[in-house]
Image (cartoon, helix red, strand yellow):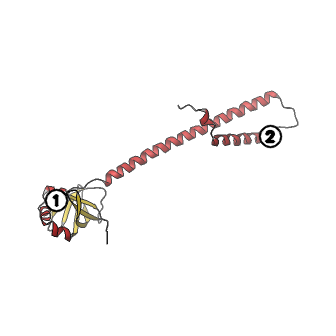
Amino acid sequence: MKRLSIKEIFTKSNISFIIGIIGFISAIFSMFFDWNQSLKFKWFGLWTILLGIIILLLLLLLSKVKEIRNENIKELQTKLDESIANYQRLINIEIKAIKFSPKESILLVEKNPRFEERQFVSIDYKLDEFHIPFAVGYVSSVQNNSIQIKITEVDTNFETKYPDEIKKISENHKDSLNSLLIKKYYKYDN
């Protein structure tokens, strides 16, 4: 168990709390005390000790509440950091193309929880560390182990500049399929 230091007990917020408690207890005490009678020392001492014990217990309770709150904040921060890390891992997962069917214009890719049916996607071709737009499409079917992407439009610039790569993709060359990067579709109009 953590030991309390004097600095932790007598902070500004704790001192104002102590003053409030003393005022509350003295108000209750004054309702039952006849000020015209003489004050006996034993009763004064007893009330002082009792008041000191109550204040000490309240301070301990207050510091324990702060300690528990700080632990909860640290725990929540840890969980939040883990969630952010998991989300970042999920976003940065590279989805690999498995197979391409040129007749149906369907690309079969590994299953990924980021993609849902009818979601637009963009497909880039990674060539010498550059991401070149290849095609756009949508998720037409989500299966147990794979996702089917219906290609709606192949980039005309890619068709004219890289006909050999299109041929390799159509013939399902492993290296060419591995060079395809599937992303959520964000449209950019000039």
Q: Amino acid at mark 1?
A: Lys
**Residue 137 in picture, x, y percent from top left:** 25, 67
Q: Residue at x 17, y 69 (%)?
A: 159
Residue on which disc 1 sits: 99
Q: Nearer the viewer, residue 41 or 74?
A: 74
- Mark 1 neighbour class, 10 Å CA radius: few under 14, some 14 to 19, many 20 or more: many
Q: Residue at the location (42% across, 48% down)?
A: 80
Amino acid type, residue under disc 2 in the picture: Ser
Residue 60 appears in which quarter of the rendering? top right
Question: Relative to residue 172, is residue 104 depicted above or below?
Answer: below
The residue carrying mark 2 is 30
Please identify the quadrant where the C terminus is shown: bottom left
Q: Does dot 1 land on a helix, a strand or a loop?
A: strand
Q: How many numbered markers are drawn? A: 2
Label 2 environment density (alpha carbons within 10 Å; few <14, some 14–19, many ≥20): few
Q: Write the residue at 68% across / 39% down.
A: 18
